Amino acid sequence: MSLGRYVRGGVLLREPRTTKSFRDAGDRIVRQESAVSPSISGLLSAPAIAARGAITDIDAWDVRLAALAALGQYDGLTFVTLGQPNVHAAYNLVDEAPMDPAILAAVDQAANSGTTVQLRASVALADDRMTSAVLVTPLAPSDAYVGALVAFRVGRPFGAVDAYAAVGIAEIVSLELARSLTIRREATERQQALALYELARHALFGEELDETLQSIAMVVATTLEHHAAHIWLRRPDGLLRRHAAYPEGRTTSEMERESDHGALWGALHERRLVRLSGAASVAWTPSNVSEVLVVPLRSDPRPLGILVLGRDQPQYGLDDIEMADVIGTFIGRVVASAARRPSRTTGSTVATRSVTDLEGDGELAESRQAT
């Protein structure tokens, strides 16, 4: 006799079969999952999300690159933009890793050809390991930058699947980079607008020229992230005298000849802004900076002096240079107008020592009116 049927009185009888339902199947699955050990059920459940806080843009890039490195199974990750030295972020890399000549050559090749490049390179990671393979993938085309994503691995090379994944990760980095640059540009524009407003306020309400120039130097340094700002005015004997400095006492020289250095000559006689690196050893530059901008204080027919802006890190970019040129022209007009500003007490023309010297040189031939 087989299961489910038997013979009674010569008649074959069958047991009634139970009807299967999806609800019963679901109940059985639930009972089976509840019987799984806690260690396995933890792996099958939804993972807990440990969000890292990001206050600054640098913090946000740390979070982004750490997550993308985990998705791509990279031991190190960064991106390099050509022509944008202030944009830099990295995961598990020492600072000088992306500056390796072989990596920079691969970045240039990938960015210009639009292809993914792999090379063997031993690069020190922040966790004291050494990489064996580097994958370089171009970032998405943009008018603001040209660059590439650079991924690092230890002990194994990259394959064809990794190249496809790197293209997708590079697209994500490109979108975030464009967003980051837009935020930086808007912040810079607001900062520059505030600086120009403060400069105009000090120029309008200042009474003594030296006091006004000192206030201008302080505003320029503090609002535009310069480590130092000095203002020098020309004398008819070919000497430059420092009239304002912020912070004070940062040079060993208070008087210089305009012919003593090529940067001074270029600013005063060629009316051009001069960028000077390694400036800490120059006597008339601030002692706490490594790079300076020597900006002519433009007026007709020749500049009235120079504005010296100094910074240690980061280096000056194109926006800094353009803004410095605008400020130099503004200060030049402030100095030129000081000779014909009427005194509030006597109504006579106020002539400071620096402007008087310039008038004797024939550059500001404004006649003074007696009271």
Image (tube, rainbow, N blue to C red):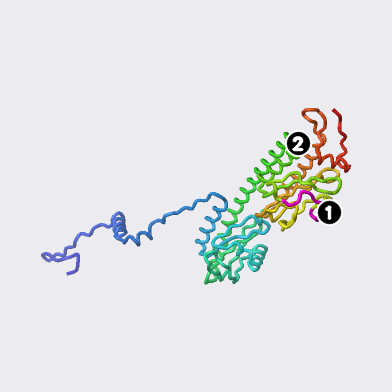
- Residue 229: x percent and y percent? 71, 47
The label on residue 259 is 1
Estimate how packed mark 1 is, as few (under 14), some (14 to 19) or many (20 or more) residues with alpha carbons within 10 Å: some
Cα separation between marks 1 and 2? 29 Å
Outermost left residue = 9
Q: Is residue 209 a member of the stretch shown in magenta?
A: no
- Residue 245: x percent and y percent? 72, 46
- Residue 196: x percent and y percent? 70, 40
* Residue at 22% across, 60% down: 17
Quadrant location of the N terminus in the rendered image: bottom left
Nearer-the-camera pick, 72 or 163: 72
Q: Is residue 324 left or right of residue 182?
A: right
**Hey, what amino acid is under mark 2?**
Glu
Work out whether mark 1 precedes mark 2 in sequence or the reverse, and give the earlier one. Answer: 2
Nearer-the-camera pick, 85 or 246: 246
Nearer-the-camera pick, 43 or 90: 90
Quadrant location of the C terminus in the rendered image: top right
Q: Tell me whether circle 1 and circle 2 mark residues in contact (CB < 8 Å).
A: no
Quarter of image, res 38? bottom left
* Residue at 23% across, 58% down: 18
Q: Secondary structure at mark 1?
A: loop
- Residue 197: x percent and y percent? 69, 38
Q: Is residue 87 left or right of residue 251?
A: left
Task: Give the residue number, with chain letter if any, for mark 2.
Answer: 208
Give the overall secondary structure of the magenta segment: loop
* Residue at 77% across, 29% down: 344
Chain part drawn in magenta: 251-263
The label on residue 189 is none
Nearer-the-camera pick, 182 or 111: 182
Estimate how packed mark 2 is, as few (under 14), some (14 to 19) or many (20 or more) residues with alpha carbons within 10 Å: few
